[in-house]
Amino acid sequence: MAEHCLALKLRRASRVLSRAYDDALRELEVTANQLNMLAAIEKIGDARQVDLVKALEMEKSTVSRSVKLMEENGWLEEVSYSEGRGGYKLSRTGKKLLADAAPVWREVQGKAKETAGLASLGVIVRG
């Protein structure tokens, strides 16, 4: 069953692809997951953790840990709302990191598109 399981094959492919992004972004000291969260916060504006959970379809605990680390790194600033609940926005450092990471992301994205084309999909499906 495992040798034909599409879910297993997609998870494996996802780990390989994530590793490629993380390797490319390592010199900037950011992971692909963190970069995607920063990009989501930039797109959403002031984002609460629940907004990130919904937008990125991530586990609450993963978002919580990542937000805490990104805040400690100075990439996020806390925003308070009148109803007492808080959210986050990109700090100046977070905006600079996102801008610095963009060309690195574009390069690895291009390579990923080239190597993860239909031939790779066929390998995943056929096994």
Image (cartoon, rainbow, N blue to C red):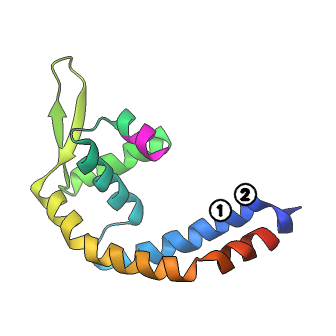
Q: Are marks 1 and 2 in contact (CB under 8 Å)?
A: yes
What span is colored magenta in the figure? 52-57
Measure how far apart labels 1 and 2 are at the Cα level.
Answer: 6 Å
Amino acid marked by disc 2? Ala
Q: Quadrant of residue 16?
A: bottom right
Magenta stretch: residue 54 in it?
yes
User: Where does the N terminus fall, quadrant-wise?
Assistant: bottom right
Query: For residue 11, which numbered disc appears in the image?
Result: 1
Measured as percent of width and height from the top left, residue 36 is found at 36, 57
> Vertical placement of 49 versus 14: above or below?
above
- Magenta stretch: dominant SS? helix
> Vertical placement of 98 versus 24: above or below?
above
Magenta stretch: residue 37 in it?
no
Q: Residue at x 19, y 67 (%)?
A: 99
34 sits left or right of 45 in the view: right
Which residue lies most toward the top here?
Answer: 83
Measured as percent of width and height from the top left, residue 53 is found at 43, 40
